[in-house]
Image (tube, grey):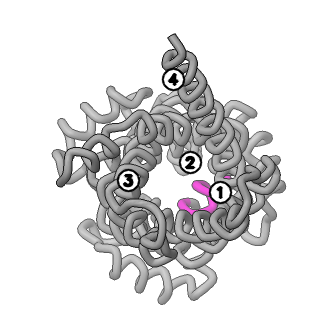
Amino acid sequence: MSQSKLKQVFSYQSWVHAVSGSAGSVIAMSAFYPLDTVRSRLQLEEPERRKALSTWRVLKNLIDEEGFDTLYRGLVPVLESLCISNFVYFYTFHSLKALRGSGSGQSALGDLLLGSLAGVVNVLSTTPFWVVNTRLKMKGLEQQRRGDASTVGNGQHSSVRYNGLLDGLQYIARTEGIRGLWAGAIPSLMLVINPAIQFMVYESLKRRLTEGTKKSPSAITFFGIGAIAKMIATVLTYPLQLVQTKLRHGNADKSLNLPPDVDTVQMLLIILKRQGVTGLYRGLEAKLLQTVLTAALMFMTYEKIARFVTSLLLSKGASGGRH
């Protein structure tokens, strides 16, 4: 690797993209977190429990049954994990782009490959955080299954014996070993295609919009192309996301009577056999609503922060050069 390429990988530009991506994702998730809670419940609860209910009805039911706080259960560890995860992803993606170089080398297929490589690095380094998050978020569901509604929200009588990210990592490592920390890693590795497709579509649309012009697209434009990119990626990969959530939660779906060491393909076949094709897309409405809005806001915020910080660095560099 040449020295100039190495400098690009460890340049301020890669850090700017990573920090901007982290900040954008935290802002976006904070805004739409209740929809992510609904998505998790629909994926993990027994199908009969909230059958034929819309996303908004599920939100209302959760508030009535468990209180408003349940919509934000596990928010802090999710934001911590999201910050780490998106920093890793954006830094890796843009460092790889720097290595590839600009100009004629840019293509949709190239972006797909870089996005996949960035996704693999991200999965291998951050899966334990998401295992803890999924279990923290589902405390209310476990308490409901025990018929102990009086304890919902205070963490009693739950198999989840921790309240934070670090506590959860230590507890799972101690009780389930390393394998428990990387539960759901296989579907997660398969799912690197999701952000890869997302970034491929996003970068392609952005290139088309900025081609031949120096004018930056508006915030609403970034919001729109971010939404389109995420919608396409989510619909194409949703069954794997469903399996990923179930495996991270420790196969706690009693309606499926899962064997203890079920793998990704077995889980897909079991859901297909017992719940049909609709079972593979349970919770898709809530997922699309949450993930599309979150991704759109994230990309819009990310672009604005990245451009602001970059212009700030350039103006400082220019003023420094005049002295």
In this picture, is 207 found above or below 296?
A: below
Report the residue at 65% width, 61% height from top: 287
How packed is label 2: few (under 14 Cα within 10 Å), some, or many (20 or more)? many
Secondary structure of the residue carrying tag 2 is: helix
Which amino acid, mark 1? Thr
Label whose residue precedes the other's in the sequence (4 or 2): 2
Q: Which residue is mark 4?
A: 317
- Could you tell me the amino acid type at mark 2? Leu
Question: Principal SS element in the magenta part?
Answer: helix
91 relative position to 140: left or right: left
| SS at mark 1 in the image | helix
288 relative to 136 in the view: left or right: right
Specify the farthest residue to the front.
Answer: 322
The span from disc 2 to disc 1 (Cα, nearest Å) is 22 Å
- Sequence-wise, the earlier of marks 3 and 4 is 3
- In the visual, does 56 lie left or right of 35? right
Answer with left or right where residue 320 lies relative to residue 315: left
Q: Amino acid at mark 4?
A: Gly
Residue 48 at least partly seen: no
Residue type at mark 3 is: Ala
Residue 247 location, quadrant? bottom left
Which of 77/273 is in front? Answer: 77
Q: Are marks 4 and 2 in contact (CB under 8 Å)?
A: no
Please name the residue that numbered disc 1 is placed on: 291
Q: Which residue is mark 3?
A: 98
C-alpha distance separating marks 3 and 4: 21 Å
Distance Cα–Cα, label 3 vs label 2: 45 Å
Kindly identify which residue carries mark 2: 141
- Label 1 and label 3: CA atoms lie apart by 28 Å
Magenta highlight range: 38-44
Closer to the camera in the image, 280 or 213: 213
Helix, strand or loop for disc 4: helix
